[in-house]
Image: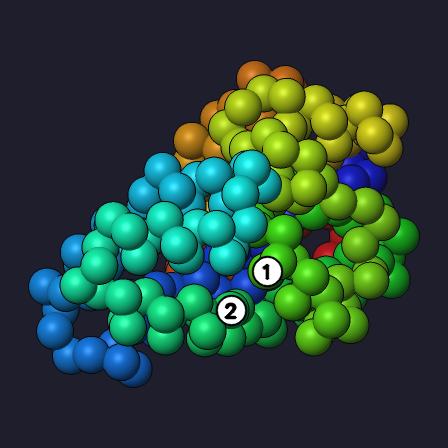
Amino acid sequence: MIRNIIFDLGNVIFNFKPKHFLRKYTNDEEYIRKFISNVIRSRIWLKLDRGTISIKKAEEEFFKKFPEDREFIKTFFIYWMEMLTPIQENIEVLYDLKSNGYKVYILSNFIVEAFDYVKKKYDFLSLFDGKVISGQVKVIKPELEIYQKLLNKYNLIPEECIFIDDVRAFLSRAKKLNINTILFTQNTDLRIELRNFQVDI
Ligand SMILES: [Mg+2]
């Protein structure tokens, strides 16, 4: 019997669409592609996710690495968190799960400063019964330890959990621990997927 629903944040609870966001600042698609690969898919960004450097420090590292992009990087770091807007249909699912007696948790690779930002901005985050945020615990998905941290911290039985993520590789690791999984994509109807597990929603 399913009792616990575990949510990823990026592209499950909050939109995270850098390409779309960067188009506000340039129409140079090649520049956008490079920027995403240099900054958002970089090892420095992974360190942010892991909470081993601050955003301020990361920004300095990016300035050093890409001096010609300094102004663009600066602008990006002022505004990027604004792209973290709620995915409304899933927030409604979240409310319904709570009122139907399920426990809800967060398991996310998320930068500490960004989590503080969304926490201040969006009340619905207080609905969650618990959370493991990579930047806070210094471990990232798909490392097994981060899944175990969540299970142990809240005494969860894996078979009673469903983990929802938009990244297949993060789900396969959860499956290894016997956690049930749902891949969330743009075409996913989360309610239907949850009902497949006999969740009352
Ligand atoms: Mg995600």
Q: Residue at x 31, y 57 (%)?
A: 63
Check disc 2 and give the amino acid type: Met
Q: Nearer the viewer, residue 12 or 117?
A: 117
- Dot 2 falls on a residue whose secondary structure is helix
* Ligand 1 under 8 Å from disc 2 Cβ: no
The image quarter containing residue 93 is: bottom right
Q: Residue at x 65, y 27 (%)?
A: 147
- Residue bearing mark 1: 114
Q: Residue at x 75, y 44 (%)?
A: 131
Circle 1: is it few (<14), some (14-19), or many (20+) Cα within 10 Å? Answer: some
Q: In the rendered structure, are the residues bearing label 2 and label 1 in contact, judged by CB atoms less than 8 Å apart?
A: yes
Question: In the picture provided, is 13 more to the left or to the right than 120?
Answer: left
Q: Nearer the viewer, residue 117 or 124?
A: 117
Mark yes or no: residue 180 visible. no
Image quadrant containing the C terminus: bottom right
How far across and how far down the image is residue 73, in percent? 32, 66
Q: Nearer the viewer, residue 183 or 54?
A: 54
How far across and how far down the image is residue 151, in percent? 76, 27
Image quadrant containing the N terminus: top right
The colour style of the image is: rainbow
User: Is residue 141 depicted above or below 45 in this figure?
Assistant: above
- Residue bearing mark 2: 81
Mark yes or no: residue 61 visible. yes
Q: Residue at x 36, y 38 (%)?
A: 43
Check disc 1 and give the amino acid type: Ala
How far across and how far down the image is residue 36, in percent? 27, 56
